[in-house]
Image (tube, helix red, strand yellow):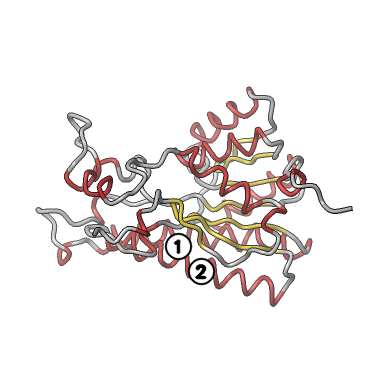
Amino acid sequence: MATSTLSLFDLHGKVCAITGGGGVLCSAISRSLGQLGVKMAVLDLIPNAAQRVANEILADGGQAIAVACDVLDKASLEAAYQTVQDKLGPMDILINGAGGNKPQASTNPERSFFDLPADAMQWVFNLNIIGTILPSQVFGRSMAERGAGVILNISSMNSFRPLTRIPAYSAAKAGVSNFTQWLAVHMAQEYTPNIRVNAIAPGFFLTEQNRFLLTDEGSGELTARGQKIIDHTPAGRFGVPDDLIGTVVWLVSPAAAFITGVVVPIDGGFSAYSGV
C-alpha cells in the first residue's frame, strides 16, 4: 500500500535538539514542532530563555526540556547531549539555530570597513560557523552510530547575496551554507544516506540582532535600509517566525527523504527580484 500523504509529515515521538532555542525564530520553530508531537530539547546559552520556551511547549500539551548550552564549548555540548539522551531518548533531529550578528562587526558612517575590530568579526564567525560545526559533531556522532538522523542548519539570504554593512555575518552564513553541503555529502558517503543535512535561508525577519539596522530605535519606523528591503521584497513585508514552519517541517520529516545538501530560501521573493 502506498504511503499516505499525511504520514510523510508525521514527526510524532521524534526527539529534536535545537540550539538557540530561546531566540525569536527558533522559539517559534520549537513550539510548532512540539505541537506535532516532537520531544523538544530547547538548548540556549541563557537558561531562562530556554526554560520559557520549554514551559510554553509543556503548557500546550507537548514534551520539552530546557538545557543550558554553549555551542562554542564542546564539553558543554556533550553534557547537553547526555541530558537529552537521558531525558528524551535517542536523537533524531538537530536544528542548528544559534547564530547572529553584532553592531561592532557592522560598518556605519562612524565605523568604516577598515576600522572593524578583529575580535568583533571573530565573534560573528565563531558563533555562526563554529557554533554550527561543533553541535553537528557532538549530536551527529550519535546519528552516525544509529544510522539515521536529520540535521537542519539555519543559513541566511546573505549567503546568496551579501548585504552591505555586514561583511562578517554575510561571510559567516556563506560558510554555513557551504558546510551544509559538505556535511550532507560526508554523512552520506562515510556513514549512511539515511542521515540528511539541509539548511533554510531566511530572508528579512526582525530579530534582536538586526533590529538596530532596520528600524529606528526611538520611533520604531523603518530606517532607509529597512525601507529599501521592503521595496525589494515582492511579498512587501518582513517575514514573521511562522513563515519558517512549513519548510522546517518538510525538511525534517520523511516527506524530504530524498532531499539533502540543499539551502532553501524563505525570503518573500527577495532573491528573485533584480530591482528592475
**Rendered image quadrant of residue 186:** bottom right
| Residue lying at the far front of the rendered structure | 276
Residue 120: % across, % down:
28, 57
Q: Are marks 1 and 2 in contact (CB under 8 Å)?
A: yes
Q: Residues within 10 Å of mark 2 (few under 14, many from 20)?
A: many
Q: Nearer the viewer, residue 227 or 109?
A: 227
Residue 15: % across, % down:
71, 45
- Inter-mark Cα distance, 1 to 2: 8 Å
Q: Is residue 153 above or below residue 50?
A: below
Pointer 2 residue: 179
Pointer 1 residue: 129
Residue 225: % across, % down:
20, 48
For the point 47% across and 62% down, the residue is: 130
Question: Which element type, helix, strand or loop, lies under badge 2?
Answer: helix
For the point 34% across and 48% down, the residue is: 234
Of the 4 image quadrants, the one containing the C terminus is bottom left
Q: What residue type is disc 1 on?
A: Ile
Q: Nearer the viewer, residue 81 or 17?
A: 17
| Residue lying at the far top of the rendered structure | 59
| Residue lying at the far bottom of the rendered structure | 189
N-terminal label among 1 and 2: 1
Q: Is residue 201 above or below residue 25?
A: below
For the point 34% across and 59% down, the residue is: 169
